[in-house]
Amino acid sequence: MGHLSDRLAAVRERALHAYSLRAGTGNGLRIVCVTKGRSLASVEEVVQAGALEIGENYLQEALKKGVFRLRDQYGILVRFIGRIQSNKLSRVMREFDALDSLEERLLSELAPATLSGEVRIKEFLLEINAGGEQQKGGITLERVRELFAGRKQPLPSFVSGFMAVVPLEATMGERTALYESVYEVFREVQERDASPAFTILSMGTSDDYELAITCGANMVRVGTALFGPR
Ligand SMILES: *Cc1c(COP(=O)(O)O)cnc(C)c1O
């Protein structure tokens, strides 16, 4: 597959090309390198090649591997993108720079008053389970609409955006429809709440990041396209 730095350059080029085709581009495109199951050496290699953000799914793995040392050395952002267990929450809040997999139940728990000085996380994204899959985390689009679109309540102001996941088996046509729906709700929330901090739309992985960008993503999460199959 060639060098990791070449693959990162290729992903970046394709992603930026897709981003440039969109009307009204936003704050710039961000690429998150997903490093679950990868060695520290691979993570360091991609960081040295210029990656600015990495995503980890498990607290224990991230600690054991030592990605936080890399963060301190290179100034990258380490994002938590996995299923969050209640008993690990406070540690996740202290170690990571961003939490992209926020669940509905945490919205009230994490209200600003309960956020102590121990919190390192700067960006919280609400995870959207776009396909409504039972076994996956995240809030459905129907539920987001029900809770926040009807102007019943604004989305808490500490939420900076959405991270959407789609079914693995979904076709490109189905993904297009799902990503477009997520973008629509994202825009609704942006317009209604007019929160200047609500700007991030993370959607698209190795299989479909160009498509997701075309549908409105400004953050993508890429693992296998960089590191090979897991
Ligand atoms: C593993 C993972 C990815 C990366 O998927 P690839 O197909 O390897 O690019 C993206 N997002 C989440 C939430 C993941 O768990």
Image (cartoon, rainbow, N blue to C red):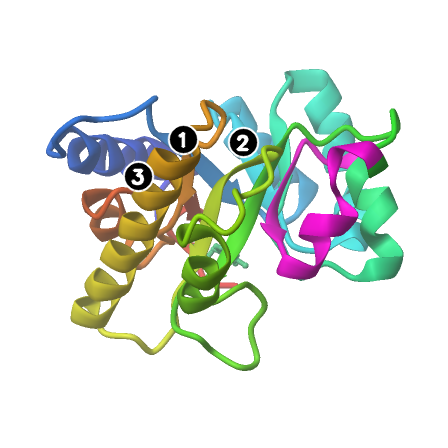
Q: Is residue 227 visible?
A: no
- Dots 3, 2 in contact, CB < 8 A: no
Callout in the foreground (1, 3) = 1
Q: Position of residue 168 (x, y in %)?
A: 39, 73
Q: Which secondary structure lies at badge 3?
A: helix
Left or right of 144: which side holds 59?
A: right
Q: Mark 1 or mark 3, which has the lower sequence index?
A: 3
Residue at the image point whose x is 62% and y is 33% from the top: 158
Residue at the image point whose x is 71% and y is 27% from the top: 70
Q: Position of residue 132 (x, y in %)?
A: 44, 75
Q: CA distance from mark 1 to mark 3?
A: 12 Å
Amino acid at the residue labelled 3: Val
- Dots 1, 3 in contact, CB < 8 A: no
Q: Which secondary structure lies at badge 2?
A: strand
Compared to 151, does 5 lie above or below? above
- Dots 2, 1 in contact, CB < 8 A: yes
Most distant residue in the front direction: 152
Amino acid at the residue labelled 2: Glu
Q: Which mark is residue 216?
A: none
Residue 108 part of the magenta segment: yes
Q: Which residue is mark 3?
A: 11
Q: CA distance from mark 3 to mark 2?
A: 14 Å
Disc 1 crowd, CA 10 A, few/some/many (<14, 14-19, 20+)? many
Q: Which residue is mark 2?
A: 53
Please report the bounds of the magenta region as a residue range: 95-113
Q: Position of residue 210 (x, y in %)?
A: 23, 47
Q: Which residue is mark 1?
A: 30
Q: Nearer the viewer, residue 174 or 17?
A: 174
Residue at the image point whose x is 55% and y is 50% from the top: 126
Residue at the image point whose x is 69% and y is 25% from the top: 71
Q: Nearer the viewer, residue 199 or 224?
A: 199
